[in-house]
Amino acid sequence: MALSRAMEDGVLIRMDVEVVARALLGAVTEAVISCAEAEDFMACAEGYLDTLGMLVAGLAVRSA
């Protein structure tokens, strides 16, 4: 699994990989549902992409 590998390689903070995977899947699923119902799909998707990118960036290991 990519998340496990990224944690093993020190790219992402080590956490319970199943919890992280489910949280990300839930966020992506909600974004897809929301954008599918939106009048302007692309504008909606761009907003979610920015937010999801920030969430993933928050999982990154910080250099000292």
Image (tube, grey):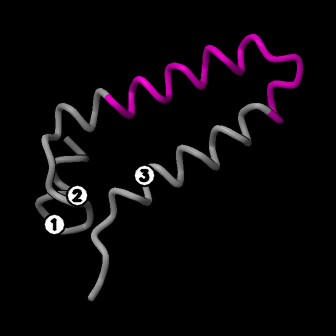
The numbered mark, 3 or 2, whose residue comes first in the sequence reads 2
In this picture, is 42 found above or below 64? Answer: above
Q: How far across and down, in percent of the image, does residue 24 sit?
A: 38, 34
Q: Nearer the viewer, residue 1 or 49?
A: 49
Sequence-earlier tag: 3 or 1: 1
Mark 3 vs mark 1, foreground winner is: 3
Nearest-to-viewer mark from 3 and 2: 3
Which residue sits at x=17%, y=32%? 18
Q: Residue furthest top?
A: 37
Residue type, numbered disc 3: Val
Secondary structure found at label 2:
helix
What residue is pinned by disc 1? 9
Asked if 53 appears above or below 34 in the picture, the reply is below
Relative horizontal placement of residue 29, taking residue 59 as reference (left or right): right
Q: Are marks 1 and 2 in contact (CB under 8 Å)?
A: yes
Residue at point 33%, 56% (across, down): 59
Question: Would you say the magenta stretch is mainly helix, strand or loop?
Answer: helix
Residue bounds of the magenta highlight: 23-43
Q: Quadrant of the C terminus?
A: bottom left
Picture disc at residue 6: 2
Check disc 1 and give the amino acid type.
Asp
